[in-house]
Amino acid sequence: MTGIAPLPEEAMPAVRGTLKAQAPLAPLVWFKAGGAAQWLFEPKDAEDLADFLRLSDPSIPVMALGLGSNLIVRDGGVPGVVVRLGKPFAKVEQMDAVTLRCGGGASGILVSSTARDAGIGGLEFLRSIPGTVGGFVRMNGGAYGRETCDILVECEVVLRSGERVTLPLDALGYTYRHSTLPEDAVVVSALFRGVSGEPAAIQAEMDRIAAAREESQPLRSKTGGSTFKNPAGHKAWALVDEAGCRGLKLGGAQISEKHTNFLLNLGDATSADIEALGEEVRRRVREKSGIELEWEIQRVGEKK
């Protein structure tokens, strides 16, 4: 990996979870492209994570990885430690009539289904976001008119120092697809609050959302979800379409014919192909409309 100094095993604290060197990340992200993590850490529990971060060299960068649905991992790999929250962090527990405590590794489908079974409405939109609670909290994830800030009460995070802190909603500085959480903080759980509802009506809304998503998005492709944020007063997909980018290809990457705010890996795309295609789309949109599209997909790691 270019520009990344090796981190010997003796530099890593002992863990109770799993810690792997030079772990390929392509299998763990939706684009199925990109390099390796210098170290991939899957903690056994929040205490294991906190101990690891507290005892490791504070200069070593740390990044959390969820389902990898909104991520371009560059081909040169990711320096430092990638933290992946597995099964121990995928639990969802009902706290009262309208509140769920959700692990940072729990999927949107699990959260919304648990809410339905408990008669909790207002969380149906999570059914349509291909990610985990940690990502929703960090990015103020949203869809179909709702956002994480509409349901979040508080979240628990582990800071790079290893300190575990509980942050209320108003401490997160939420705006559209953005929070002020430190880059290297890891969200280990969140408290979501909905409203009382009938399970059948909640399921019907989840079905409506799922059908709308199936009809409009390339769900069976190697993709990364919404590529660009919607600029104020505009839809990103429409700007991309108007700039003549529907179906545009570069190397093994393509702009989806079905939904122009989705990048696709046609099979053998490198992350460099995918990112370069996104930048070409931004250039064409800027030229056509004067609007600067902002990436919604995170791009991490080193270029080859």
Image (spheres, helix red, strand yellow):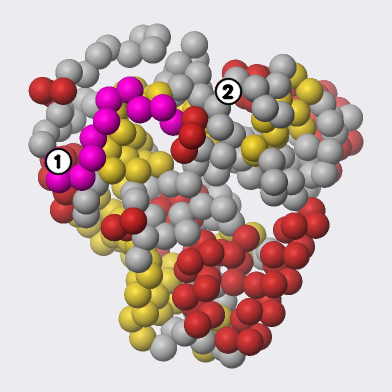
Residue 27: image x %, image y %?
Answer: 49, 34
Q: Is residue 279 above or below residue 194?
A: above
Whether residue 301 is visible to the viewer of this picture, yes or no, is yes
**Does 19 lie within the magenta span?**
yes
Q: Which residue is mark 2?
A: 271
What span is colored magenta in the figure?
15-25
Q: Residue at x 74, y 41 (%)?
A: 261
Q: Amino acid at mark 1?
A: Val
Main secondary structure found in the magenta portion: strand
For marks 2 and 1, give the CA distance. Answer: 31 Å
Residue 287 picture quarter: top right
Which residue lies at the image location 53% right of the left edge and 80% below the top edge? 116
Q: Which of the two labelled residues, at mark 2 and mark 1, occupies the earlier sequence position?
A: 1
Q: Which residue is mark 1?
A: 15
Instruction: Report if residue 206 lies within the magenta region.
Output: no
| Residue in the foreground of this view, choosing between 18 and 65 | 18
Please report the residue visible at 51 percent of the width from the left and 37 percent of the height from the top: 29
Q: Can residue 173 be seen by looking at this rendering?
A: no
Where residue 58 appears, as percent x and y from the top left, is 18, 30
Q: Amino acid at mark 2?
A: Ser
Q: Is residue 259 above or below residue 295?
A: below
Identify the residue at image location x=79%, y=53%: 216
Asked if residue 113 is positioned above or below residue 21 in the image, the reply reads below
Q: Disc 2 on helix, strand or loop?
A: helix
Q: Nearer the viewer, residue 106 or 291?
A: 106
Marker disc for residue 73? none
Can you say which quadrant of the picture contains the N terminus?
top left
Give residue 33's position: percent from left, percent from top: 55, 27
